[in-house]
Image (spheres, grey):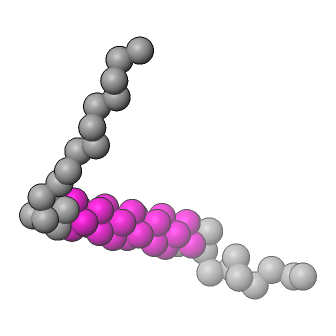
Amino acid sequence: MADPTPPVRLTPEEQKRRRQRSLALALALGVFCILLFAVTLAKLGPGVLQRPM
């Protein structure tokens, strides 16, 4: 078997960029989810919340 490659060491600048990229992706995903929820409610109309139990 071949020796495993050593782990990659990131510089502090690379770590900072990775964190910023991760936060941007998380924010974009959150906005997308809220947008889908809003569109779903808009398509179903206001009567969806007034259903008989």
Judging depth in this view, the residue of 24 and 39 nearest the camera is 24
Q: Is residue 30 magenta?
A: yes
Q: Is residue 6 magenta?
A: no
Is 10 situated above or below 43?
A: above
Residue 35: give x, y in percent of width and height: 42, 68
Quadrant showing the N terminus: top left
* Farthest residue, direction right: 53
Residue drawn at 39 percent across, 63 percent down:
29
Q: Considering the whole magenta stretch, tell me its main secondary structure.
A: helix
Q: Left or right: 12 with respect to 44?
A: left
Q: For the image shown, how many numbered marks are present on the structure?
A: 0
Residue drawn at 9 percent across, 64 percent down:
13
Residue drawn at 41 percent across, 69 percent down:
30
Quadrant showing the C terminus: bottom right
Residue drawn at 36 percent across, 66 percent down:
26
Quadrant hosting residue 10: bottom left
Magenta residue span: 17-41
Judging depth in this view, the residue of 39 and 2 nearest the camera is 2
Judging depth in this view, the residue of 49 and 17 nearest the camera is 17
* Farthest residue, direction top: 1
Residue 8 can be seen, yes or no: yes
Q: Left or right: 29 with respect to 51?
A: left
Residue 52: give x, y in percent of width and height: 87, 82
Residue 17 can be seen, yes or no: no
Is 2 situated above or below 42?
A: above
